Each structure stands twice: as C-alpha cells, then as structure tokens.
Image (spheres, grey):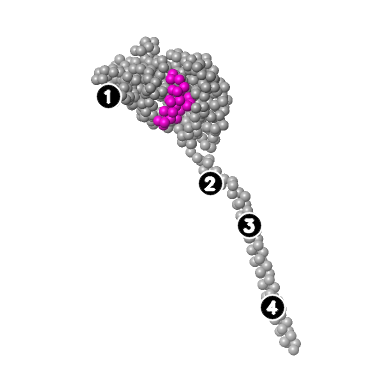
C-alpha cells in the first residue's frame, strides 16, 4: 500500500513535469510568432509610407543622367533681288529653282540639330507679281530651296515684312508653315504667345524675333492691327516675351534682332543698349541682322550668366555686292555660319553655350556662258580658295572677305 501510493505519486509528478514543459514551450513559440508578426507588419507599414519617395536607384539614375547637347547653326539675311529671280526662272515650264544657290552649304546646314535664319522677303503669290527691292515678293519655290538646304526655323520680323501688306504677311506665314518651317516674328492671326518653343534632345528653346523698322509701311495700320501682325522692337515687348518664356519653363532663350543701321560696320548705341537689356533680363543668345554687313561678336556678363551676341550676321544670300552697289559696299557679299554647342546639365538644371565656331561664306555671282544668265552660289570660303572652278579674281575677294569676317569673331 505504501509502495503503490509512492509509485502513483511519482507518476503524478512525472506527468505534471511533462505538462508544465509543454505549456512553457508552447508559450515561447507563441511569443516568438507574435513578435515576428509584429515586425513584419511594421516593416510593411514602413514600406507603404516610403513608397512615394524616390528609391536609391532612382536618385542615382537622375544624378548620373548624361548631359544633353544640341548643335545650332545660325545664318543672316536671306534675300532675293530681281536678278536672283531671273537666275532661277525656267521659261520652258514657268517654274523656279533656287536650290543650286544653296548646294555648296547644304551639308553645313543639314548636319546641325537646328538651323535658324532670317527670311527677308514675302510670299504673297504670283497674282501679286514677283519683285525684288524695294518691295520684295518671291515665288514659293524659295521656301522649298531653303528647307532643302537644312534650315528649320525662319524669323520673319524685319523691315520688309509688310512689303506686300497684311495679306502678304498672312500668306507668307501660312506657306512657310505648310512647307514645314517653324516661324516666329510675324503672324497670320494674333498669337496667344510670341515665344516659339522648340525642343531638341531634351533641351527646350524659347525663340524670339523683333524688328526695329517696317520702312514706314506699318503706319497704315492701327497700333493693335500692327501688333497682331508683327513683333516690334520695344523693351516692353521684349520683357513681356522673356517673362513668358520663363513661365513656359524653357531652358535657353534666343532672340533674333533685326536692328541697327544698314552698311555700318559697328553696332550703334541702340543695339548695344538693347543687347545689355536682354542680357540682364535672361536672354542667352542674341543673333542680329539687317545692316547687310557683318558686325562684331561679344559676350555680355551679368551676375547670373553670360550672353553671347553677334550684332549682325550680314547677308547670307542677296544681290548686294561691289558690282551692284560699288566697291565701298563689297562687305555686303560676306556672310557667316555660326555654330553653337548648347549643353544642359540635368543634375544642376543649367543650360549654357559650351563652344562657338565660325564658317565665313561668300556669295559667288558669275555669268553662265551656256544660258547667258547670272548664277548665284553661297560658298564656304575655306573650301573654295584652292578650287580650280573659281577664277583667281574672285579668290582675291574671297580672301578679303574671310580675313575681315574672322577679325570680328571672338569665341
């Protein structure tokens, strides 16, 4: 009896130990499980909170994004005088072909990402009658030739914009845009913005265009009518458009100015004043035209940035030259292609000019013995000084042109 009681007591003790051990083990397991569940829940919550923030990979990608680059080519006045119209005319089918005039510079204008020029004539149509100076009206084929040469953007605000009146202004813009150009400076109807926004290679350009004069032809219109058609060069207009360009968040502002005095080798006080004004207000590049001769380049430094300016790029093509105006006007034969390398640093959100290059050009005019008519070609001077197809008397003039042009250029 005593033995059995002791044995039973030992059995009860063993079972109590086993049960206690199982309870403790189960408690530990449950505690670990609950702790892990709480950790996972907190981790998921943290991930949800941070999901809107850029990941390290995204930040790294933005910081290491390569800079964007754009190569711009700029040229001066494109004009078509009476003798040029005769040169391009084909009487057999009553058509015009101006493409040979640009054939020698076509590779230089098509290679850049963007090429801009001043279109100093109108396209009022055949019914208006084609003519050169003093009231320009050219065949639509001039637009075909310019587009084929590589020009993408045409500025149309100049002193000859109103040569064929308001109808000519409107038709000129419409034809150019139908051909595929972007235009700025004159309008078929009043625009909501005077800024031409053009994006290339992730760089957004804001392009402006103004003229100082309309040769008095604007006087026949009310101020509102005139303003709706053409951008006049006033500080109020320029400041308005610069502010608009900034509102549109462009990276780089270009202003094409038709200003100054004809045939003057130096910029006048008004050109200098307006260039300083534009630089102080945020214009990055100023391209000048109208004097029909090349004027100097300069860099205007302000507290915030640098502005490159060329006060006049001269005539890219015209019939102005020594033979038509006299020896003292030989510089009207001179032109230039200016290249600007524009670079945007995406990390710093800064866009600037990193390089400038110059190619002097010269308008070659000679009599074609087979057709007994004048031929015109825009020549990159350096490529033709040793050419056997160019007469030595022309080469002397080309050398003069090259040296004088380069003397005015500074990087």
Query: In the shown orientation, is residue 25 left or right of residue 62?
Result: right
Q: Which residue is nearer to you in this view: 374 or 338? A: 374
Foreground: disc 3 or disc 1 = 1
Q: Earlier in the sequence, mark 3 or mark 1?
A: 3
Foreground: disc 2 or disc 1 = 1
Q: Which residues are magenta?
A: 163-188
Q: Dividing the picture into quarters, in which one does residue 358 lie?
A: top left
Residue neighbourhood size for the residue with mark 2, other residues' Cα within 10 Å, grouped as few (<14), some (14–19), many (≥20): few
Q: Is residue 298 visible?
A: no
Q: Dividing the picture into quarters, in which one does residue 146 lie?
A: top left
Residue neighbourhood size for the residue with mark 3, other residues' Cα within 10 Å, grouped as few (<14), some (14–19), many (≥20): few
Foreground: disc 1 or disc 4 = 1
Q: Residue furthest right?
A: 2
Which residue does the numbered mark 3 point to in the structure image?
41
Whole-angstrom CA distance, mark 1 to mark 4, is 122 Å
Q: Are marks 1 and 4 in contact (CB under 8 Å)?
A: no
Which circle marks residue 92 in the picture? 1
**What SS does tag 2 mark?**
helix
Position in image of residue 238 (x %, y %): 54, 23
Whole-angstrom CA distance, mark 4 to mark 2, is 60 Å
Q: Earlier in the sequence, mark 1 or mark 4?
A: 4
Which residue does the numbered mark 2 point to in the structure image?
57
Query: In the shown orientation, is residue 301 left or right of residue 75?
Result: right
Q: Earlier in the sequence, mark 2 or mark 1?
A: 2
Whole-angstrom CA distance, mark 3 to mark 2, is 25 Å
**What SS does tag 4 mark?**
helix
Position in image of residue 334 (x %, y %): 39, 18
**What SS does tag 1 mark?**
loop
């Amino acid at each position: 009896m005593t033995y059995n009681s002791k044995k039973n007591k030992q059995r009860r003790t063993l079972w109590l130990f086993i049960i206690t051990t199982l309870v403790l083990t189960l408690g530990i397991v449950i505690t670990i499980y609950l702790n892990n569940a709480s950790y996972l829940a907190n981790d998921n919550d943290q991930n949800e909170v941070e999901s809107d923030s850029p990941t390290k990979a995204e930040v790294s990608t933005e910081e290491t994004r390569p800079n964007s680059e754009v190569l711009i080519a700029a040229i001066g006045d494109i004009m078509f005088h009476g003798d040029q119209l005769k040169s391009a005319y084909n009487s057999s089918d009553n058509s015009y072909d101006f493409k040979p005039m640009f054939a020698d510079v076509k590779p230089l204008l098509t290679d850049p990402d963007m090429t801009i020029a001043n279109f100093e004539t109108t396209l009022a149509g055949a019914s208006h009658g084609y003519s050169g100076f003093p009231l320009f009206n050219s065949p639509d084929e001039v637009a075909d030739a310019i587009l084929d040469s590589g020009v993408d953007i045409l500025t149309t605000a100049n002193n000859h914009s109103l040569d064929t009146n308001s109808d000519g202004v409107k038709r000129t813009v419409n034809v150019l845009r139908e051909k595929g150009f972007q235009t700025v400076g004159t309008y078929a109807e009043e625009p909501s913005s005077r800024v031409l926004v053009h994006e290339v290679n992730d760089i957004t350009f804001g392009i402006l265009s103004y003229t100082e004069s309309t040769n008095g032809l604007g006087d026949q219109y009310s101020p509102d009518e005139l303003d709706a058609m053409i951008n006049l060069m006033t500080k109020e207009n320029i400041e308005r458009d610069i502010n608009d360009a900034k509102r549109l968040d462009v990276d780089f502002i270009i202003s094409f100015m038709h200003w100054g005095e004809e045939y003057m080798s130096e910029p006048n006080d008004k050109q200098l004043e307006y260039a300083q004004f534009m630089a102080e207000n945020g214009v990055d590049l100023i391209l000048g035209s109208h004097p029909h001769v090349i004027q100097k380049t300069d860099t205007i430094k302000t507290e915030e940035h640098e502005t490159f300016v060329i006060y006049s790029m001269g005539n890219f093509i015209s019939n102005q030259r020594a033979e038509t105006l006299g020896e003292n006007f030989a510089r009207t034969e001179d032109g230039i292609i200016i290249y600007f390398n524009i670079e945007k640093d995406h990390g710093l959100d800064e866009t600037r000019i990193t390089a400038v290059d110059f190619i002097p050009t010269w308008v070659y005019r000679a009599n074609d013995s087979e057709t007994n008519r004048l031929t015109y070609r825009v020549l990159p001077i350096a490529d033709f000084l040793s050419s056997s197809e160019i007469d030595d008397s022309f080469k002397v003039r080309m050398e003069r042109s090259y040296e004088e042009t380069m003397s005015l250029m500074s990087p």
